[in-house]
Amino acid sequence: MLPYVILILLALICAATDVTPVRNRIVFALPFFMVMFMMAAFRDHLGGSDYEMYELFYSKVVGVGDYLRGSYEPYYRTKSVESGFVFLSSMIRSIDFTHGPYLFMFVIALITFSIFIPSLKEYTPYFYIAIFFYMYKAYFWHDFTLARQAVAIAFFTYSIRFVKRREYWKYIVLNLLALSMHHSAVILLPLCFFLNHKFSVRTILIAMSVAIVVSLIGPSLYEMSMRLTETIGLGKRLALYASETGRINPLNFIEIFVILFCALFYREYYEQKEPYFNIFLNLFMVSSFIVIAFSSFDIFSRFKEYFVIAYMMLVSYMVGHVRSNRNRWIIFAFLSVYIIMGYFRYIMVFDDGGLLPYKWILW
């Protein structure tokens, strides 16, 4: 447990330097990012069943020369895994001097961290508050488990700047690359056509109302879809990809309500202060619609992971732009308690305690 405690304490200290800026905060930031990266890059079989899946997948990946000649083995999805990720894996295999998945996991972590983390500085002046929230919301799930999608998320995160600049072709190219890493990135391609649009409060509330209605009738839609697809022989396939997983987590609903209320109430102020605010509000609306409307269906669970950045950015704005220094510290204190509780809860419950104790390959 000690490595996890050290990591979140460093994250807390760094975030506090956004609440009240201090000099030489690199003294805290450098150890924080080193520990954050090393815990993901050098973990030893931590990440649930996905780690085992990637280990087995990588065991059958061949060097890039053999891959280009088409001689890799069609085993354990090496031919159905997205072609971009297979090619990346083959490149890693070509230089791999280890036995096992260790260099593979290291390179994946290196790629995701080197793209994702620096990208955030473009979008918020309260960079460390955003990262602090990420530690609770997605760090373990993204960086310990979602290898393919973590790379896709990194490309998407970097591409958001091109929506603001209206350089849509760059956005599309980067997300086509993301699509070659994980098929769920297909949802990202059409977003560039409306992320710059400012939707009215009325439109946003209507969208949320529709999401609630869809959530309520979701089980009935599932049954109707199953019956329809069974008549054409696709029932089993739909059941695989659209299986029900239960209702929305109440904490997710509370987060959505609180963030949405604050974002809309102080909308004009945030728009004046933050050039990317409207884009992240729109991304948050997409995420909220998916979470509320389709929480019962497993196929949609991966889509929402791309939009964690919207939570991070909006939360950083909401804390960082509190005008009173005293109130800013009070809000930050409550947020810190919430983040730390969620962080340790995730460690305890993920994979029935599979993250404990922390194990890495260095010793």
Image: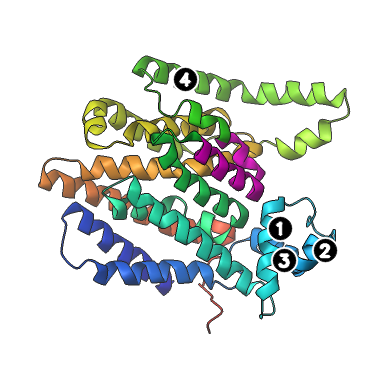
Q: Amino acid at mark 3?
A: Tyr
Q: Where is 296 relative to 213, above or below?
A: below
Q: Are marks 4 and 2 in contact (CB under 8 Å)?
A: no
Q: Nearer the viewer, mark 2 or mark 3?
A: 2
- Measuring 39% from the left and 36% from the top, which residue is drawn there? 165
Q: Nearer the viewer, mark 1 or mark 3?
A: 1
Q: According to the image, label 2 marks what residue?
A: 72
Q: Are marks 1 and 2 in contact (CB under 8 Å)?
A: yes
**Camera sees residue 135:** no
Q: According to the image, label 4 marks what residue?
A: 207
The answer to which image quadrant residue 323 occupies is: top left
> If you read the primary sequence from the N terminus, does the residue marked by circle 1 or circle 3 appear first?
3
> If you read the primary sequence from the N terminus, does the residue marked by circle 4 or circle 2 appear first?
2
The answer to which image quadrant residue 359 occupies is: bottom right
Q: Which of 325 and 158 lies nearest the eye of the viewer?
A: 158
Q: Are marks 1 and 3 in contact (CB under 8 Å)?
A: no
Q: Is residue 177 magenta?
A: yes
Task: Give the class, few, some or many, for how many residues have Cα within 10 Å of label 3's Cα (few <14, many ≥20).
Answer: many
- Measuring 49% from the left and 34% from the top, which residue is drawn there? 168
Q: Position of residue 52 (x, y in %)?
A: 69, 64
Q: Nearer the viewer, mark 4 or mark 2?
A: 2
> If you read the primary sequence from the N terminus, does the residue marked by circle 4 or circle 1 appear first?
1
Left or right relative to 141: residue 36: left
Q: Is residue 343 magenta?
A: no
Could you say which disc has been placed on residue 58 in the image?
3
Measured Cα–Cα span from mark 2 to mark 3: 11 Å
Q: Main secondary structure of the magenta part?
A: helix
> If you read the primary sequence from the N terminus, does the residue marked by circle 2 or circle 3 appear first?
3
Q: Which residues are magenta?
A: 169-188
Circle 4 sits in a helix, a strand or a loop, which is it?
helix
Q: Amino acid at mark 4?
A: Ala
Left or right relative to 174: residue 33: left
